[in-house]
Amino acid sequence: MKISRVEITPAAAIIIDKLRREHGELMFHQSGGCCDGSSPMCFAKGDFLIGSSDVWLGEVHGCDFFMSEDQFEYWKHTQLTIDVTPGRGASFSLEIPLGIRFFIRSRLFELDELDQLTPIHVGPLEV
């Protein structure tokens, strides 16, 4: 059985369900840029163009999760968990008008987990 690189808290899943009802299919991208760029941002699927150097880490609660390749180099040994917290970020992420923002919790993978990880994909996914 493969180990997921991205997980989600129940609180974040509730927010994703709410956003999905309003915006349809969703996706996440984490660029690793300054300010809010290091937070996971939620977009309507297709509203953020995935580049050839973006890494697909997997699907979480029905949403594809991408990260810039440079940022992935820092996070490749960690399992990411999407969570929410009160507060307003400065990003274009869909949850911002709700007065909350997504953020990442992380844990290092155990050595015996490394060969069981979900395979990544670099670049846009084929539809």
Image (cartoon, helix red, strand yellow):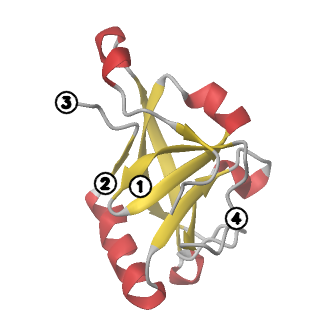
> What x and y, as percent, mark residue 45?
54, 72
The residue identified by callout 1 is 83
Q: Earlier in the sequence, mark 1 or mark 2?
A: 2
Q: Which mark is residue 49?
A: 4
Dot placed on the residue nearer the N-terminal end, 3 or 1: 3
User: Which sits in the foreground, 14 or 69?
Assistant: 69
Residue type for callout 1: Asp
* Mark 4 or mark 2: whose residue is earlier in sequence: 2
Comparing 125 with 86, the one in front is: 125
Image side of residue 94 versus residue 113, left or right: right
Which SS class for mark 1?
strand
Residues at circles 1 and 2 in contact by the CB criterion of under 8 Å: yes
Q: Neighbour class for label 2 at 10 Å: few (<14), some, many (≥20)?
A: few
- For marks 4 and 3, give the CA distance: 31 Å
Residue 75 placement: quadrant: top right
Farthest residue, direction right: 34
Q: CA distance from mark 4 to mark 2?
A: 26 Å
| Residue 81 image offset from top left, x and y in percent | 40, 45
Considering every residue shown, the one lying at the far bottom of the view is 22
**Mark 3–mark 2 distance (CA, rounded to whole Å):** 21 Å
In primary-sequence order, the first of circles 4 and 3 is: 3
Q: Residue at x 70, y 64 (%)?
A: 49
Q: Which one is closest to the eye, mark 3 or mark 2?
A: 3
Q: Given this view, does label 3 or label 1 mark the residue nearer the observer?
A: 3
Q: Which residue is mark 3?
A: 1
- The answer to whether mark 1 and mark 4 are in CB contact below 8 A is no
Three-letter code for the amino acid on which mark 4 is drawn? Leu
Q: Position of residue 4 (x, y in %)?
A: 33, 38
- Quarter that holds the N terminus: top left
